[in-house]
Image (tube, helix red, strand yellow):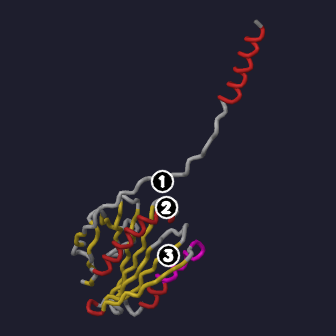
């Protein structure tokens, strides 16, 4: 009788020591799915000194920090928690100051940027000239900025920011999507 009890205890001991071992496999960190809407554009209000087409999924709002400046607006992308800040100035023999300020604001991103690519904007038929800056890097706060001018009367500067901690690796699909919208805005841009 002692032998069957001993076998039962040995089998139970084996089952307890091998059957309860748990192996933990960590799951990779996941990100939310980003649904990108179909591209569709609408016209900007005709009360501003400039015009362009902006996406249907964006909202145009007056800049609450405009300090009395006309033509300062924000184009908000609520679905992506992003804002394109647009400021406007009238040129009075100070174009070099405005363009240098725009470059300075772009180059403040150098510590976090892995590259800053610029594209010249030359549309002489509409008197639209400027530079588009694409700022690459995981922690850059503003991945896209640009300025436009007619070189005599008008100057416009824009910068895209997201209201989240900068992690442009995970924001890359949204950045590329909105960069195409910014390029469309530039292509349809003209002065009033």
89 is higher (above) or lower (below) than 29: below
Say which element carries label 1: loop
Q: Position of residue 60 (x, y in %)?
A: 30, 66
Q: Which residue is mark 3?
A: 135
Q: Which residue is mark 1?
A: 31
Which residue is at a point 45% across and 60% down the rendered structure image? 163
Q: How far apart are the alpha carbons under marks 2 and 1?
A: 8 Å
Instruction: Name the residue nearer the viewer: 25 or 114.
Output: 25
Which residue is at a point 42% across and 70% down the rendered structure image? 160
Q: Is residue 108 located in the magenta-colored stretch of the structure?
A: yes
Q: How far apart are the alpha carbons under marks 1 and 3?
A: 23 Å
Q: How far apart are the alpha carbons under marks 3 and 2?
A: 15 Å
Q: Are marks 2 and 1 in contact (CB under 8 Å)?
A: yes
| Residue at the far top in the pictured view | 1
Q: Which residue is mark 2?
A: 170
Which residue is at a point 41% across and 90% down the rendered structure image? 95
Say which element carries label 3: strand
The image quadrant of residue 35 is bottom left
Mark found first going from the N terminus, 2 or 1 = 1
- The quadrant of the picture occupied by the N terminus is top right
Instruction: Name the residue nearer the viewer: 47 or 79.
Output: 79
Which region is colored magenta? 101-112
Q: Position of residue 143 (x, y in %)?
A: 47, 72
């Amino acid at each position: 009788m002692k032998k069957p009890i001993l076998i039962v205890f040995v089998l139970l001991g084996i089952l307890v020591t091998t059957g309860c071992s748990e192996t933990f496999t960590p799951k990779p960190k996941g990100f939310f799915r980003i649904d990108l809407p179909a591209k569709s554009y609408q016209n900007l209000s005709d009360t501003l000194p400039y015009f362009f087409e902006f996406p249907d999924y964006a909202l145009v709002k007056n800049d609450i920090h405009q300090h009395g400046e006309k033509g300062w607006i924000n184009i908000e992308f609520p679905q992506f928690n992003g804002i394109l800040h647009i400021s406007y100035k009238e040129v009075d023999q100070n174009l070099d100051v405005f363009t240098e300020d725009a470059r300075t604001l772009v180059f403040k991103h150098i510590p976090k940027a892995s590259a800053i690519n610029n594209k010249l904007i030359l549309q002489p038929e509409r008197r639209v000239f400027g530079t588009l800056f694409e700022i690459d890097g995981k922690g850059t706060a503003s991945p896209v900025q640009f300025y436009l001018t007619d070189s005599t009367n008008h100057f416009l500067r824009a910068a895209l920011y997201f209201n989240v901690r900068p992690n442009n690796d995970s924001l890359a699909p949204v950045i590329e999507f909105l960069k195409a919208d910014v390029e469309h805005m530039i292509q349809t841009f003209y002065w009033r």
